[in-house]
Structures are given as structure tokens and as C-alpha cells.
Image (tube, rainbow, N blue to C red):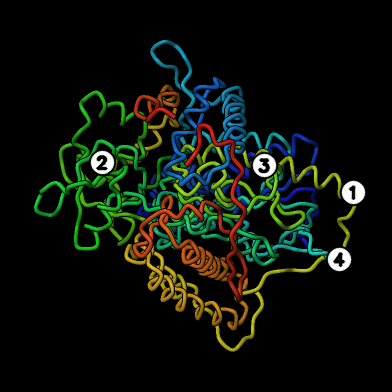
Amino acid sequence: MAGDFDTDVLVLGGGPAGTWAALTAASGGARVVLADKGFCGSSGATAAAGTGVWYVPPDPAKRQAAMDSRDTLGGHLADPAWMARVLDRTWHGVNEIAAWGYPFPLDQDGAPRRNSLQGPEYMRLMRRRVKGAGVRIMDQAPALELLVDEHGAVAGAAGVYRQKDAAWTGRAKAVVIATGGCAFLSNGLGCNVLTGDGYLMAAEVGAEFSGMEFSNAYAIAPAFASVTKTLFYNWATFTAPSGAAIPGASSKGGRSVIARWLQRGAVYAQIDKADGATQATMRVAQPNFFLPFDRAGIDPFTQRFPVTLRLEGTVRGTGGLRIIDESCATSVPGLYAAGDAATRELICGGFTGGGSHNAAWAMSSGHWAGRGAADHARASGPVTRRAVHRSGGAALVGGGGFAMDPQALVRVVQSQVFPYETNYFRTGDRLEKALTVLDDHWHEARRASPAARSEASKAREAVAMLATARWMYRSALARSETRGMHRRLDHTGTDPTQRHAFASGGLDKVWVRPLPPVERAEQGLAA
Amino acid sequence: MIELVSTERCTECNICVQVCPMNVFDRVAGAAPVVARQNDCQTCFMCELYCPEDALYVSPHTTGIEPVDEHALADVLGSYRRAIGWSKPARHLRGNDRSYQLLPPA
């Protein structure tokens, strides 16, 4: 068939992690195909939003300070060896980007400053590099399911070209999942692309997750707009409708206060603590922050505007596919994971990777996953003609009888994951109640008839969000304590015996099990 | 959401159709692309950056259809592209990211 191909490494997702994976695999001599649901260069959170980068010079004291700075916030779950490894790889990766011509600014002393990446610029450059390395890019080509061989090893993927009403099937010796996290179509900047598609495909071949309880990151945005960039709210005052300042409300360390007030009514912000020079710097630093205000005729420095908190799920959370070794392999042979599709607990524990940690993780894990996949492909030898079968379930195969309504299913999932009273502030009772609804819909989705080709991508997105919500809430139930961003109103303390990650997985029956604690040399990073 | 494909400015290159990460545009033979799935627009503004003719306008509002007057937007069309240095007269702005002055130390 015209849509069929055969390759060494297939990368799913064309954001930072996917492009780094493709580049590294190709530079090792592998034949590489990269398939993106949208367009490699504009897809995902980074391209639209831009990001800080966890870029720290190789000075032992600075590196140690960088590692220590987030350890308490993350509930002491991060792995110091992985942090050190990511800091090192990120240093090299960012310097490579500079060598490729990324226009990093120079400070007043003429020194390059490399701890921030403008999204459009970064991802346009990455696309060019990927193309230049001989990678075949398939845009507007969402993968729908993985292919597996008779031993259960991953052997490719199948999907559709959504602008052509055509299907594709790609055999590969190894697959990298770099499809991002899941933000549940909450309208965060660039985040509606991120619907957990890769999680679903990976779970269908038996892959495991880790840290899915750390999935309730909420970002501040103007209530009317998509721009979920939170840095400048460090200079904001948050007020009630009356105009009175809200005690304790702040972007850092006081976001839950904002959530509490939003449960009762409107909350306003004004970036009133930035002086004239800072305002000017903000404008040239992050032009996209100002788009909503300029276009709506609001001066955010002198006028109040309504704000909301948009769920960013596992995009700014830290849960994702479990990594079993330094090559970013998952627990399934032939399957690798990178970026927000993979767990970031290794470097962030249970607290948000924010932009900068996630950016460092994307370039590092992408690099390692690409190399791991290429090595796996090389070691596999000429096996591409092995018998393979499709692994996709809900919305692709089904009982028949009734058609799934993806939009209605999305609304159901959102009704269970958006509310602050269920997801931001968690209790066992509310999680159980939400899981009853979600589980019922899962079993119904399994009985639905297969979606038509033109509807398949949207149907699979809805199913992926549904599945993601179930791993999230089962994991949140299992962690009967408060740690990192996971907040249990019925278990407000941190339980020293739960200083370990939880793995999860499964589809018809979702399971959760504790993982062994990270072994640490207890000097600088003790709890 | 995307509110305008200017038929006065559009040269039918269809780059927006290709680059939209949410696939909201449809190609039309011999004419400007149309916004076929407006509700899928995620208000990411990426199409504006890639449009070489500054023919697109994305309203900042994530919901609600909002008719716009193209001529009233003359100064706004292309403004994001200029701000990040992606239009020729503004090339010097590409390397102007001052975020390092605002980010907390790592």
C-alpha cells in the first residue's frame, strides 16, 4: 500500500523530545521516520510557549545547588544520579543548539545567556536539523496504535494522514514515544495537541507508568485566553472582585489560594509589581505573553484582568511512561519514551518540572531514547519481515452496536479532571466517585463500534484522555499522603514510608504498585 | 481562535494548512484556505508566525466566534511575527530574548 514503509527507528511526536530522538538516532546511522499528529515545528507546548532551560555550567557547587533547589518541593523522590546526568546532557545539548545557529542573546558583558528558548525559533531550527539529518518527517500523520511481533516486542505503528483520508503502516525495529503529556484539551498554550495519545498506545502493548498521581498541575492564564505562561505572575497582585488583595495568593507557593478563591468566584490579577525597566524587559523577553492583552485592549501593568487556572495535567506534572534504564527504554522491548510522555520524577520528583526542567528532560531523554532505539535496531538485525499484529483497542476494534461520540466523552473526562475540588484538592471519596464514572465510560467505550478513519484520531484522543484520567486517579488513591503537587485533604501529612514512586498501568483493569525507593547517598539530598 | 484569512493578502500558498498543529484549515482549489474547524483552534498563534503575507488573525479569546473587521486590524496583522523577529525589517529581534534577566537562578 502507498502508506506503508519500513524503517529502523520510528519516532512518534515532533516536539523537542521527538526531534532530539530523531536527530540522535539518525546521526548514529539509523534510518529514521518521524510522524507528528500536527506539524513538526509548531506542535506541542514548547513551540507555542517557549521555555526556560535547566542549563547549569559544569561547576560542581552550581550543579549541586541546582539539584538541591527543587528536592524538597519534589518530595525527595528525584534520583540524584539522573539529575546529574540530565544537567550534563542539557549543557551539551544547549551548546549544540548554539553551534547550529540558535540566536542566544548576549548580556551586557558580552557573555552568551542560554537558559531560555523561544519556542518558534527553537522548533523551527530543530525541524531543519532533523530534515538535514535525512529523517523523513510525516506531518499531519497521527499514529493510532503500535504494531507488535509474536514475542510482544514493538515492531512499528499504524496511523492516518488526517488531511488525505488515507492510512499508513510503518514497520520499525524500535519506536520512540515522544507524544507529550496529557492536558485534557484545557486550552493551555499549545497544549490541546497533548491528549495522552502515546500513553494509550504504550499501555496497549503493556508499558507501565510511574508517578501518574503527579498530574494536577494548573497554570495561571487570563480567563479569556490561552496563554498559560506563569513567570510574570511573580510580579502580580491577585484580587477579589471587590478589589481587595487576596491574602496569600501568589503564583509561587500561593496558587492553591487562587484555586480556593476561584471555587467561589472571580479572581483578578494585575502585574503591578514590575517597574518600568522590568516591564520593558518582559515585553522583549516574551512577546507571546502580551498577545492576549494587546489584542483585548488591556494594559496588564495598570489594569486588572480576570484569571483562571487551566489544568496542564501531566504536561507540567511529572507522571508518564516508566523508564527502566539509561537508554530511556520502557518495560516493553523495542519501545522507548522521551519528553513529557515519560515520567520526569527522575529529575523533579513529585513537583512540576515547570518549563526549564521539562525542557532539559526533553533534550536529554530524547537524545538517549534516540540512541537507545538506534542501538536496539542495530542489534535486532534484519528482522523487519517478522509477522506483526496491531495492538490498538478502544475505538479501533470493538463490539459494535453503537458509535462513540468523542466530543461527549471528552466532556465527561473534563468534568472529572478539571474541577479543583476533585483534582487540585484530592480526597479518597472524591477520587473513588470520579473513578466510578471514568471506569463506567471506559467499559462503554470498549463496546463501541470502531471509529471511521476520518474520526479515528479524535476518538483515540478521547479514549486516551479517559485512560490517562484513570491511571492518574488510581495512583492518587494509592498515595495516601500529601507529597509534591499531590495534595490529599484526607491525608495532609507526608508519610515517610511512602517516599517511593508508584507504578501503574492496565486498561480494563487499572493497577497500581509501589516501586522500590531510589537509593541515595544521603548527604546533600536527605529528607 | 482564528478569525480571519484575508483573501486580499492571501497568495494561496497553503502553508497555514500544513503547519496548523490542530488542523483547522482546509485547502480550497484556486482560492484562499478556509477555516473549516474553528472550534479545534487552540489559540496558539503559530499560523500567524508562519504566514508570509500576514494574512491571518487569531483573536485572543479561546471561545466564542467574533467577527472582525480586517481593515481595523491593519496594524495588528503580522504584529506577532514582527515581535519575534520573523519578518525581514525586524530580524534583529530574533536574538533579543531578555528572559535571563527575569528567570530565577537555576
Q: What residue type is labelled 4?
A: Ala
Disc 4, disc 3: CB below 8 Å? Answer: no
* Dot placed on the residue nearer the N-terminal end, 4 or 3: 3
- Front tag of 2 and 4: 4
Numbered badge on residue A387: 4
Q: Identify the element where label 3 is drawn.
A: helix
Vertical placement of residue B10 versus A275, above or below: below
* Dot placed on the residue nearer the N-terminal end, 4 or 1: 1
Disc 2, disc 3: CB below 8 Å? Answer: no
Q: What residue is pinned by disc 2? A: A294
Q: Can residue B42 be seen in this view?
A: no
Counting from the top left corner in percent of width and height, residue A65 is at: 47, 28
Asked if residue B39 lies left or right of residue A251, the reply is right
State which chain disc 1 sits on. A
Q: Residue at x 18, y 36 (%)?
A: A272
Counting from the top left corner in percent of width and height, residue A418 is at: 37, 64
Q: Which amino acid does label 1 sit on?
A: Gly
